[in-house]
Image (cartoon, grey):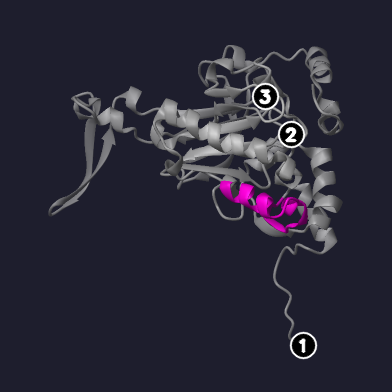
Amino acid sequence: MESPAANDVNNCDSPASKKRKLEDNKQISIHESLNNLTEFKLEKILYNNTNRKSICLQGVFHNSKEPALVLLEKTGFTETNFNGDSEFFTEKSSLKQIFHNDIYGNYEFLPKLELNSIGATIIHPATEKHIKKYSIQNVYLVDETPALYEEVTLPHITEEQFDLQWVYNILDHKSEADRIVFEDPDDTDGFILIPDLKWDGKLESLYLLGLVRVHGLKSLRDLTAAHLPLLRNLKESGTKAICEKYGLTAAQLRIYLHYQPSFYHLHVHFTNLNHDAPGTKTEKSHLLSNVISNIELVPDYYQRATLPFIVREGENLVAKFEKKGVLTRGACRSSSP
């Protein structure tokens, strides 16, 4: 059962109200039968990240007026593909020379189709918040004091956060039950460990999420000494489960929380330390071991600390911080006469 805090935040998107919305609109999920993109009509490219080899496309599917987002990302190599008689080195793959100079040759390599897969994430129907999230925009760094959190950020979260029903579906085994890597059913300190949507399934890019069972914990700001058993359990049981299933030790994992998170149900990220996962920059990620240590030293650390985070142009939060005088857009004002 959801805590009162969670109900206050999410009552407009409760399972009952969401079911009524779906029934009223007679929506049928495209994910029930989607097996190609022939019915996707491209309207706009939201971003094209050449570093991450990823692109986000906005459009619509045939017979649907609802906007859709298609995120495509080229998958990384896996070493197992090169063991023994690798299929990369057969007549089914081809080389096209672009140029050569002395001992150096530059080629376009075309492996067989099965070795050239692209990861895809499809969001439908996509909300305006999804579209803003995946669009290229100016970003700004805000140093959020506890007062700013209470006066600006918390009311914003309450009003505008994403629906959390998909999280509750996982916790209740209504969705993705076959993908669960580890589960601790304890109502207070338990969690579910599940692959992140961004993970392509290769050990080199391992990316799992630890979703806590308790409802009402939104982010770092809610954590106190009362949550130390939960945080320690996430760290210890999560690393043990990953070691047993994937063979990676605690020293080979990056375990962290985001602030601000992309959704406001407390969760922890577990990634392969060798993987350059998104969202690991200093202004975004907080190592779980540091979070535990901070709370051990100061029980209400995250209610007293100033926490920096990034806001994006177009988000309502930008205007709210600007109105408070803690964020300035545009050119710097000169102090000279």
The spot of residue 3 in percent (x, y) is: 82, 28
In this rendering, is residue 208 above or below 33? Answer: below
Question: Residue 262 in the image: x percent, y percent?
Answer: 66, 40
Question: Of callouts 3 and 2, which one flags the residue occurring earlier in the amino acid sequence?
Answer: 2
Query: In the picture, residue 282 is in which quadrant?
Result: bottom right
Can you tell which mark lies on residue 162? 2
Is 110 covered by the magenta stretch? no
Asked if residue 208 can be seen in this view, the reply is no
Q: Is residue 71 left or right of residue 170?
A: left
Say which of 281 and 212 sits in front: 212
Give the CA separation, mark 1 to mark 2.
47 Å
| Residue found 28% across the figure and 32% down from its top | 110
- Measured as percent of width and height from the top left, residue 285 is found at 59, 49
The part of the image, by quadrant, that contains residue 80 is: top left
Against 213, residue 100 (above or below) is: below
Q: Position of residue 165 (x, y in %)?
A: 73, 24
The Cα–Cα distance between marks 1 and 3, rounded to whole angstroms, is: 64 Å
Q: Residue at x 59, y 45 (%)?
A: 288
Classify mark 3: residues with Cα within 10 Å, few (<14), some (14-19) or many (20+). few
- The image quadrant that residue 201 belongs to is top left
Q: Nearer the viewer, residue 100 or 312?
A: 312
Q: Is residue 315 above or below residue 95?
A: below
* Contact between labelled residues 2 and 1, with CB atoms less than 8 Å apart: no
Q: Which residue is mark 1?
A: 337
Residue located beneath label 3 in the image: 186
Q: Is residue 306 above or below residue 48?
A: below
Q: Nearer the viewer, mark 1 or mark 2?
A: 2
Residue type at mark 3 is Asp
Element marked by disc 3: loop
Residue type at numbered disc 1: Pro
